[in-house]
Image (cartoon, helix red, strand yellow):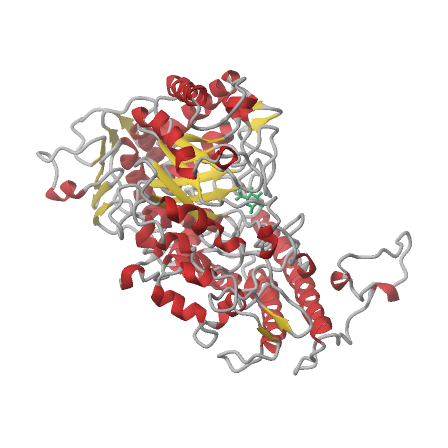
Amino acid sequence: ENGRQAWLRYAPLTGSKTGPPALPQSIIALNATQSSPVFTAGQELQNGISGIFNKHLTVSSSHSSASHAWSLVQRHSSRTHSERLLELEVDGFWLNVKGSAVQIVGQSDRGALYGAFEYLSMLARGNFSDVQLVSNPAAPVRWVNQWDNMDGSITRGFGGASIFFDNGVIVSDLTRAAEYARLLSSIRINAVVVNDVNANFTTIQPGNLQGIGRIADVFRPYGVQVALALDFASPMEFGNLTTYDPLDPGVIQFWDDITENIYDIIPDFAGYLVKADSEGTPGPLMYNRTLAQGANVFAKAIEPFGGIVMYRAFVYNLLDESVWTADRAKAAVDFFQPLDGQFLDNVIIQIKYGPIDFQVREPAHPLFANLLNTNVALELQVAQEYLGQQCHLVYLPPLWDTVLNFDLRVNNETSLVKDIITGKRFNRTLGGSAAVVNVGANDTWLGSHLAMSNLYAYGRLAWDWSLQPDDILKDWIQLTFSQDKTVVDTITQMSMASWPAYENYSGNLGEQTLNDILYTHFGPNPQTLDNTPWGQWTRADHTTIGMDRTVSNGTGYSGQYPPEVFEVYESLEKTPDDLVLWFHHVNYTHLLHSGKTVIQHFYDAHYEGAKTAWSFVPMWESLKGRPGIDEERFEDVLFRQNFQAGHSIVWRDAIVNFYHNISGIRDDAGRVGNHPWRIEAESMELDGYELYTVSPFETASNFT
Ligand code: BDP
């Protein structure tokens, strides 16, 4: 059990009380050509049933006399099937289980495959009930973004090298790419951007485009389409033009030609992702063109082929010194709101969940409330860049939930972020989500078995944003480990406690993640937060802390929200504790709604968070030998939980010492600076070690 099969293990059922269900005699995959997802569905059902029940079923592609069969069809015909099929929307499926007679009908080829995966998921979880289920996606765009680079590295990759690229080209062995497509398809992801947003023009050079075509070929049987991130300056860097001005006829021609080449090789190519004018990347602003003019060049080129353009809202000028003193959180609305309505219909603005950058807590991005005539999508990060880099267990859906279910009150009406991104709130036809995923060549994919719950949950949510984080988790645990109640309950408890714990020991009250912002984005380094162009500011001094983002006294960010939300955030009194330092600059002695002072909250939260992380070790240990908890994965997870437990103490002590030193305010509970049981490195005598000045000093064992 090395984790490579993730949640698609199809292991024999353990801990199930009921016997096996009445199983059909054969599988009929109707109209299935070899590279079609319907064909894949037949294979997957065959493998799944064989793994779970040790029963081998034949697969055929035409109707036979078998009465107990699965039929998979590409498109429904209302003559032959129930009325409910009329409810199917794009990519939807119908699953009809009546004992041993099972029908799976997809609205499209991949819909049929989704239905097969759904049926297998039920069986693998020991759910043998009859169902009649119509399932449709919340939105058409359910993408993942790889941040893989052509040299084989992965930006913020913590799970090994790229499964797509090496040494400037596409790898010859795409076995892992096909396995990844299988995982994605089982959670109904329909497209992957295979290269990093900080794109390199070499990806679209002819030789590499052929390679991208090979990736598309291994993805196709799983109904997953390929998309590419573009380098805005390619016309100059590779097209030999003297400009990349989006309105220049030569540049327009360049993108038209590239697009045509791509579709020649990949007829079902999904579209482009564009990071422009962001952190120093080239973009239309270079030529005083608007972001809409930039986006629309790609949109026009790709429109005849049915492709779309995901244009990222993560636009700010890192080199502009004024962002150091102004407020980067405001940049996206400042840039995009005036352009609302100017983007073509096949452009989607891809917006991170918060206005800074995947922090442990951020308010919902105000841009969601400012684009009423433009398609939008949500950008999440399965990669735990700021959230422990897969060395810490942090189950992310509870964090995502704070944004998805946030009511932005646009025009004083209910406007949940989840209804805005699906297009429902403002009647847009295109919308959805993308998640940054850093799977790599490691057998565990993400470098950590437990981190895979985040990828699984992302797909499930992208299909249905109303699902509850703990329900998704339980499905994942059953598929990944077993149905054993102790296993399910324990991992659920650990996972659900993990994001609050991480927030407690890494950055509270909306100060963001207090980690090393200059380089690693890992581990505590609160000193690096202020005065950087990245805008993760806390504005802490000896007596006060927090960023005043009010209209009355601060940066004016709170004014980017609709009136009802603005009124809450503008007021120190009304702002919830968990975002108070995001919006307000207060004394360390300011009393929170909880009745604690800010500084005492820091101290308590850090001790509590570390204690929770610590408790994960005995919880995990208690699962040793239980059904589904094999030795290999047990040891691997234990190693990581021990690391997290230790590192949470590093976090705790670094942060509480930092604020203790800077504020000079003592901890009511007398813990900070008081470690009677601790053996300092300085008191040890070890051969071969020498003293070293640790920076920042707060992370050292005894300040030296
Ligand atoms: C930041 C990452 C950086 C990405 C950037 C982005 O550190 O590597 O390029 O986000 O989203 O969080 O473009």
Residue 54 appears in view:
no
The residue located at (26%, 50%) in the rendering is: 426
The residue located at (49%, 67%) in the rendering is: 579
Q: How many marks?
A: 0
Residue sticking out furthest to the left: 79
Q: Is residue 617 left or right of residue 418?
A: right
- Examine the image and state in which quarter residue 92 appears: top left
At which x and y percent is residue 287? 50, 32
At which x and y percent is residue 626? 51, 57
Quadrant position of ligand 1:
top right
Q: In the picture shown, does residue 663 fall above or below 562?
A: below
Residue 521 appears in view:
yes
At which x and y percent is residue 417? 35, 55
Q: In the picture shown, does residue 98 fall above or below 276?
A: below
Q: Is residue 163 left or right of residue 45?
A: right
Toward the viewer: 327 or 183? Answer: 327
Toward the viewer: 228 or 609? Answer: 228
The residue located at (47%, 18%) in the rendering is: 210
Toward the viewer: 12 or 340? Answer: 340
In the rendered image, the quadrant that contains the C terminus is bottom right
Toward the viewer: 296 or 422? Answer: 296
- Examine the image and state in which quarter residue 66 appears: top left
At which x and y percent is residue 348? 36, 40
Q: In the picture shown, does residue 94 fall above or below 541?
A: above
